[in-house]
Image (spheres, grey):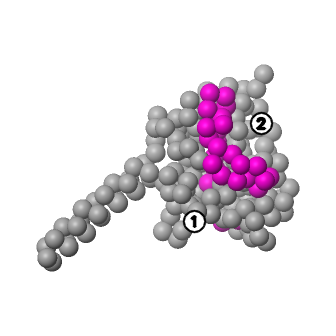
């Protein structure tokens, strides 16, 4: 009985490790996980809405109203014109709720953001993207997704203060079309 219990635990551990590795190891060419998340602007966004139409950037951050996250979101607002030159829908995202005084809607309003922050309080999308860390927050990674719904690039070395310029440079490098 003890051996059977250990065997079951080992199989479960291997299965879970495999699932985590697949989710955490999204790379260029992989299909991006679809999502349906509420934005700080009250609208619901789905990756499927953009498939065949626009590239998508999702910049995950750990927690609203914290230093690095504020710097990243401010950069994307203040220097967003560089991103807006491209035919791309872009978002920041976290596992914070959309509502409440510490929610993403309040955070977006406090920074006068002109783009939506996506909220994933159930953490399902964060898990699918492989960004959910051991603290239950998202890791600061940015995903670049092509019109075909496939991952173009994953930036795991995001610099909050230069986020917008870095995103624009990467979009150009990846050959994402500029708006006409």
Mark 1 and mark 2 in contact (Cβ < 8 Å)?
Answer: no
Judged from the image, the secondary structure of the residue bearing numbered disc 1 is loop
Across and down, in percent, residue 41 comes to 80, 52
Question: Which one is nearer the viewer's eye here, 163 or 31?
Answer: 31
Q: Give the range drawn in magenta.
A: 36-64
Looking at this view, is 165 or 62 the one in front? 62
Q: Around disc 2, counting alpha carbons within 10 Å, would you say few (fewer than 14), some (14 to 19), or many (20 or more)?
A: some
Residue 51 in sight: yes
Residue wearing tag 1 = 137
Left or right, 58 with reference to 104? left
For image coordinates 54% across by 68% down, the residue present is 136
**Mark 2: which secondary structure?**
helix
Question: Looking at the rendered structure, which numbered label has been put on residue 84?
Answer: 2
**Numbered disc total:** 2
Quarter of the rendering containing residue 109 = bottom right
Image: 80 above or below 150: below
Quadrant location of the C terminus in the rendered image? top right
Mark number, residue 59: none
Residue 67 appears in the picture as rendered:
no
Give me the residue at 66% from left, 35% from top. Answer: 50
Left or right of residue 96, residue 19 in this image: left
x and y percentages locating residue 146 in the rendered image? 58, 32
Q: Which of marks 2 and 1 is in front?
A: 1
Does the magenta run of residues contain 43?
yes
Residue appearing at x 62%, y 41% in the figure: 47
- Where residue 141 appears, x then y in whole percent? 57, 52
Q: Which residue lies furthest to the front in this view?
A: 1
Q: Distance from label 2 to label 1 (Cα)? A: 28 Å
132 on left or right of 74? left
Q: Residues within 10 Å of mark 1 (few under 14, many from 20)?
A: some
């Amino acid at each position: 009985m003890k051996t059977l219990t250990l065997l079951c635990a080992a199989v479960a551990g291997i299965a879970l490790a495999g699932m985590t590795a697949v989710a955490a190891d999204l790379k260029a060419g992989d299909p991006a996980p679809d999502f349906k998340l509420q934005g700080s602007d009250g609208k619901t966004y789905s990756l499927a809405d953009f498939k065949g139409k626009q590239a998508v950037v999702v910049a995950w951050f750990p927690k609203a109203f914290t230093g690095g996250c504020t710097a990243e979101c401010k950069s994307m607002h203040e220097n967003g014109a560089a991103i807006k030159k491209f035919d791309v829908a872009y978002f920041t995202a976290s596992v914070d709720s959309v509502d409440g005084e510490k929610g993403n809607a309040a955070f977006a309003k406090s920074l006068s953001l002109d783009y939506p922050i996506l909220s994933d309080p159930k953490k399902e999308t964060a898990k699918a993207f492989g960004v959910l860390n051991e603290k239950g927050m998202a890791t600061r990674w940015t995903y670049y997704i092509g019109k075909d719904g496939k991952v173009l690039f994953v930036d795991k070395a995001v610099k909050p203060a230069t986020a917008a310029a870095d995103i624009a440079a990467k979009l150009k490098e990846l050959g994402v079309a500029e708006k006409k």
